[in-house]
Image: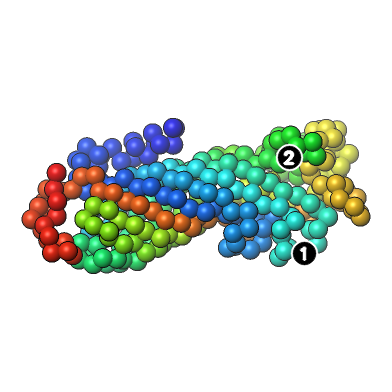
Amino acid sequence: MKYLLMLTTALLPFIGQSQRLHVDIHAAAANYQGDLQGKRFTFTNAHPALGLGLSYDITNKFIVKALATYTKLSANDKDNTTAKGVEFRNLDFRSTIYEAQLALEYNLFDLSERSFTPYVFAGIAAFHFNPYSYNTEGNKVFLRPLSTEGQGLSSYPYRKPYNLNQIAIPFGGGLKFAINDRLQLGIEIGLRKLFTDYLDDVSTSYVDSLTLLSARGPQAVAFAYRGNEIPGSPGYPADGAQRGNPKGKDWYYMTGIRISYLLFANRNDEGRKTKTGCPKSIY
């Protein structure tokens, strides 16, 4: 509700004019790329994503849009076929994502003259995440408070706790079809460039197990390295051993469809003919 209120506030000037305003519904498959999933595009561990927003036609080609999206992300080392040497790390994560996005969209063609157009978009987004996993008894455990890589511990002063509220850069594109003068259908892929490497709670190296045990308890040690849950584990790695790859930030992306319905038309368009040869309907 908070994110939807933010988006509505962002488009209040356009709502007040009640002209060329659309309501948008998004349905997509969401996935992530990071330390627990090396491939950028895969439907392994994909989750449904739902979005609701408003868009306003600044011109026939430029659109400003606001969108609130809800989805989940997950990954597991058992499915991580591109990373080497992680078979005994045995890590996994899940997270619910709440995103609020404001973006500018550009149609290559004018949909009042053609029945379809490629389009691109870019903008800024705020999102909330909170990675968690399950212990061997099936209980949910949130990972950030465990300081699995020493975040917030006095022995590792250079490792700060990561913020669960972050900024992202959404961008992407797709193909949009005009079903009629009010209804549009789009096929879209949207990527999110992130500025955190802790979407999955994995980024750098292991910390000393005794230090972690003293500061956060046995559960923190158990979730920092989960190889002990599978046979043949070489044991908890040494302090400083590689746990993740800090050279690249995490990403998430969504691939799906978008339905856009025109609520209000600009009265300046009255009498203007569309691609169907009929005057545009005006309220």
Q: Nearer the viewer, residue 53 or 209?
A: 53
Mark 1, residue position: 84
Residue lying furthest left in this view?
A: 271
User: In this image, 145 relative to 261: left or right?
Assistant: right
Q: Which label lies toward us, 2 or 1?
A: 2
The image quadrant of residue 160 is top right
* Residue 193 visible in the displayed image: no
Q: Is residue 133 above or below residue 281?
A: above
User: In this image, 120 relative to 252: left or right?
Assistant: left
The image shows residue 189 at horizontal and vertical percentages of 46, 60
Mark 2, residue position: 134
The image quadrant of residue 6 is top left
State the quadrant of the C terminus: top left
Q: Nearer the viewer, residue 66 or 42?
A: 42
Q: Residues within 10 Å of mark 2 (few under 14, many from 20)?
A: some
Q: Residue at x 18, y 48 (%)?
A: 265
Q: Is residue 152 above or below residue 171?
A: above
Q: Residue at x 54, y 40 (%)?
A: 128
Q: What amino acid is at disc 2?
A: Tyr
Q: Is residue 199 above or below residue 80?
A: above
* Residue 25 visible in the displayed image: yes
Q: Residue at x 73, y 39 (%)?
A: 134
